[in-house]
Image (cartoon, grey):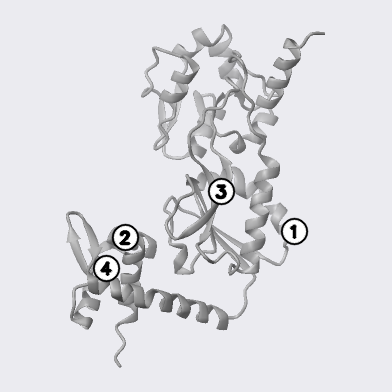
Amino acid sequence: MKLPPLHALRMFDAVARLGGIRAAAETLFVTPAAVTQQVKQLERSLGVPLLQRQGRSVVLTEAGRQLHLGTTRHLHAIAEAAEQVRPREQRVRITTVASFAVRWLVPRLQRFMDRCPDVDVQVDADHRLLDLGSGDWDLAIREGQGRYPGTEAERLFGLEVVPVCAPAYAKRHFKQGPARGWPRARLLHEVGHPWWPGWLERAGVAGIDTGSGLHFSHTVMVIAAALDGQGVALVPPPFIQDELAEGRLCVLDAQPYETGVGMYVVWPAGRGPGLSAEALQFRDWVLAEARGATAPVRRTARAPAAIPADRTPRAATTAAAARRSPR
């Protein structure tokens, strides 16, 4: 019995699981050409075509489906067997996006280290959804709707956003109220998050060029620009809790805008109980941390001109309710 080339088989398995050559290449950190070459080598070794092109995508042939069905569980078993004989490391490996890592996770990591001092934590910031089935990562924390093929996910918190700016910027542009402030305000955008048109429409603000302003590739850059007094940003409150508490940012409208996405902790499907003890500890900790640290932004009847730094959305709503209550 002759075994096929295992490296080529691993690349073919990634193509079959992820549904495409480019997705497999990104997951395996190789070029699409390298994946194609390995799949062709496997096809030559077996003497049958495994993939068939349909336009710009590829699909499995009948032979490809049979091969994938018969080998994928065995590849997983090989990876698990190798893991069992390796020296035991008390480590958890997390892949996430840079903005979440910098603005939410890293400032809280000391609490996990105090709780689990013997566990090493490896955090990798990457915008791509890496393949958790490869065994290179224990958990992922991703932005989206919680639906990722071959995984299970639990929501940490929703990405509701509110408009924020530096107090000096609010005083300069919004002192006479929102009606005069918004036409003069500079919008700070994050590429890939086109939330300003929806927020302005919901707030009843018309006549604004929603494409104008400054555009950045990451949330951390948008927040930095807002802190520097360069304009108004739409930001999830969990990412700026310290800045709001310390008065370095203020909220212009406490009513959150529902973006339809959230932050999710993700792990391979069927491996919840099979996660390492360290991965389970980290997953449970990050879920508890999100529940304890993230209070919902309460809605207000109408937008105030600017909420001072010591009046977060929760405090502003409470104060507004007190004013409306009969004495």
Mark found first going from the N terminus, 2 or 3: 2
Q: Secondary structure at mark 4?
A: helix
Q: CA distance from mark 4 to mark 2?
A: 16 Å
Q: How many C-alpha atoms fall within 10 Å of the one at disc 3: few (<14), some, or many (≥20)?
A: many
Q: Secondary structure at mark 2?
A: loop
Do callouts 3 and 1 mark residues in contact (Cβ within 8 Å)?
no
Amino acid type at circle 4 is Ala
Q: Which residue is mark 2?
A: 19
Position of residue 149 in the picture relative to residue 280 (left or right): left
Do callouts 2 and 3 mark residues in contact (Cβ within 8 Å)?
no
Amino acid type at circle 3 is Ala
Q: How many marks?
A: 4
Q: Quadrant of the N terminus?
A: bottom left
Tell me residue 69's x, y (percent). Answer: 35, 73
Residue at 29% x, 75% y is: 66
Q: CA distance from mark 2 to mark 3?
A: 28 Å
Q: How many C-alpha atoms fall within 10 Å of the one at disc 4: few (<14), some, or many (≥20)?
A: some
Mark whose residue sits in front, 2 or 1: 2
Q: Which residue is mark 4?
A: 34
Q: How many C-alpha atoms fall within 10 Å of the one at disc 1: few (<14), some, or many (≥20)?
A: few
Residue farthest to the bottom, as pictured: 1
Mark found first going from the N terminus, 4 or 2: 2
Residue at 69% x, 41% y is: 293
Residue 115's tag is 1
Residue 101's tag is 3
Q: CA distance from mark 2 to mark 1?
A: 40 Å
Amino acid type at circle 2 is Gly
Residue at 48% x, 59% y is: 151
Q: Is residue 266 above or below residue 255?
A: below
Q: CA distance from mark 3 to mark 1?
A: 19 Å
Do callouts 4 and 2 mark residues in contact (Cβ within 8 Å)?
no
